[in-house]
Image (tube, rainbow, N blue to C red):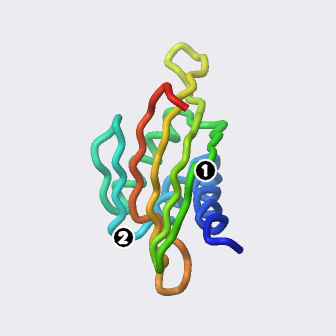
Amino acid sequence: MLIKDELEAVMERWLEAIERDDAAACAALCTEEAIFLSSDAPTARGRDGIEAIAQAWIDAGERNDRRTTLASGHSGDLGWLARSYAVDFDDDGGGVMTETGRYVIVFRRAPEGAWMIEALSIFASDLP
């Protein structure tokens, strides 16, 4: 399997956890030192902080996540994906709001060989 495919598989597991309303499973995909940077939330550090961010997305009704990998790479035990996304959320009026944006994820290979999320920087935009 290509490393790009392995990294994308981690993100598939993340999305499956969101769909199951399982924020703890999202956090378990991250290293102990992981950091999330977002334009619409405070910086999240460590699994507890990341679990809180994932729970907020679940509580907002995140669903129907569509994403495209724009670029990927790796060097040794570090890998990365750059992706665009569109995701639907419940709006306050009972309808659906679509958010689009881009993000970069850095992964670190754990000693047992699994890829773990080390850092994510995400920002919403109206641009593709």
Place of residue 21 in the rendered image (x, y in percent of width and height, measured from the top left)? 58, 47
Say what amino acid the circle numbered 1 marks.
Answer: Thr
Say what amino acid the circle numbered 2 marks.
Answer: Glu
For label 1, the crowd category at 10 Å Cα-Cα, with few meaning under 14, some 14 to 19 and many 20 or more, is some
Rendered residue at 56%/54% (across/down): 71
Q: Is residue 102 above or below residue 72?
A: above
Place of residue 86 in the rendered image (x, y in percent of width and height, measured from the top left)? 59, 34
User: Given the current orientation, which residue lies at the most extreme right position?
Assistant: 1
Q: Which residue is mark 2?
A: 32
Provide the secondary structure element on which disc 2 rests: strand
Rendered residue at 60%/54% (across/down): 17
Rendered residue at 44%/62% (across/down): 106
- The answer to which of marks 2 and 1 sits earlier in the sequence is 2
The dot on residue 15 is: none
Placement of the N terminus among the 4 image quadrants:
bottom right
Q: Which residue is mark 1?
A: 69
Q: Is residue 22 left or right of residue 77?
A: right
Placement of the C terminus among the 4 image quadrants:
top right
Q: Is residue 50 left or right of residue 68?
A: left
Q: CA distance from mark 2 to mark 1?
A: 25 Å
Provide the secondary structure element on which disc 1 rests: strand
- Residue 65 quadrant: top right
